[in-house]
Image (cartoon, helix red, strand yellow):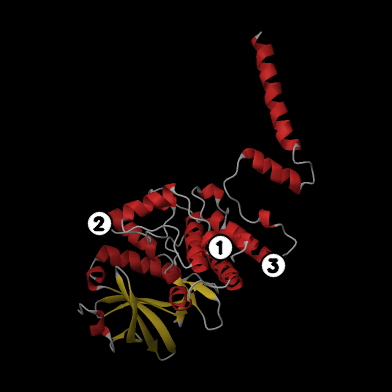
Amino acid sequence: MATQPEELLGRQLGPYTLDRMIGQGGYAWVFAGHRPEGSAAVKVLKPRYSADAEFEHRFRNEASMAIDLQHPNIVHGQEVGASEGYTYLAMDFYPDSLASRLEREGPLAEPLLIRLAGDLAAGLAFAHEQGVIHRDVKVENVLLAEDGHAVLTDFGIARAVSGYASATGVNMTVGTPHYISPEQAQGRALDGRTDLYALGVTLYRAATGDLPFHSRDWFELARMHVEEQPEPPRKKRPELSHRFERIILKCLAKHPADRYPSALALHDELRMMADPGRRTSMFGIAPRSTVEIARQLAAAAGRPRWLLPTLAVLLVVVVALLVVVLGR
């Protein structure tokens, strides 16, 4: 078997001829290729993983599941198979990625960011409804079609790596350190809101040209995701709107309960960005005190701002009096 990806160029795996290498990760090479019906991107497991029965089995299972996810904002998988000792996953080919575009152009204009965010939230909402968590949302996994819409790739692959690491005890990094959620860094149970955190990091980078946290040490990065607050995006790029900044920061909330309850809720809020009548302060949330929340609720309901805090104080006084009376 080939030990270098260049040795596979021009070779055929199943119906696919591998034309050129376009990327690689820790466990696979990615080639631009073609078959009689058209072009494809072909992810090929590196030899050591193709030869590992446990890893190969999990990869094929997760790849097959990803192929079943049929949505306009999820890359379409064509086939998962094995040929000449190699295991591969073939997908529709896209000419560009968000990572490449950011490298060429720098931070993107806010209207484009909102549109891309809406595409990604729609894809995640569909996957989450099917019980599938991505676990590795990042700019490299956002592909751009010729008409400009965004699609997510590599669904289920992080789960294959995670399951393999758990089953074998092999130390493998699951997810990308700069994008992992606090609960992912702590090894806690995950749901769809972990993808919203990674999407928040993705939008932060696309909006500012920078990541929220930097460190060469994996454990330090994990600590920062768990403990430190990111610098507000508008400090790095003042022309961003308060609305969009609030949405990004809500996605980046440390606790899952403080993020959007679902990708669908995020998608709905992004659609409302076009409504000039909706108050900026109603987009997203930042950590607030109970009094601040009460003030916002009172204002939204058309009541005086002092009403709810006053009622809260009166309630405390009444409870204290009852305790005194009952004590006597």
Q: Which residue is mark 2?
A: 170
Mark 1: amino acid: Ala
Residue 43 lies left or right of residue 104; in this view the side is: left
Residue 125: mark in rendering: 1
139 in relation to 219, above or below: below
Q: Quadrant of the C terminus?
A: top right
Mark 3: amino acid: Ala
**Residue 39 location (% of width, % of height):** 42, 87
Sequence-first tag of 1 and 3: 1
Q: Residue furthest bottom?
A: 36
Sequence-first tag of 2 and 3: 2
Examine the rendering and report whether any part of residue 318 can be seen: yes
Which secondary structure, mark 2?
Answer: loop
Q: Which residue is mark 3?
A: 274
**Residue 281 location (% of width, % of height):** 67, 54
Compare residues 18 and 16 and report the one nearer the observer: 18
Cα separation, mark 1 vs mark 2, equals: 32 Å
Residue 13: mark in rendering: none
The quadrant where residue 81 appears? bottom left
Q: Residues within 10 Å of mark 2 (few under 14, many from 20)?
A: few
Q: Residues within 10 Å of mark 3 (few under 14, many from 20)?
A: few
Which secondary structure, mark 1?
Answer: helix
Q: Residue furthest top?
A: 328
Looking at the image, which residue is at 74% across and 43% down?
298
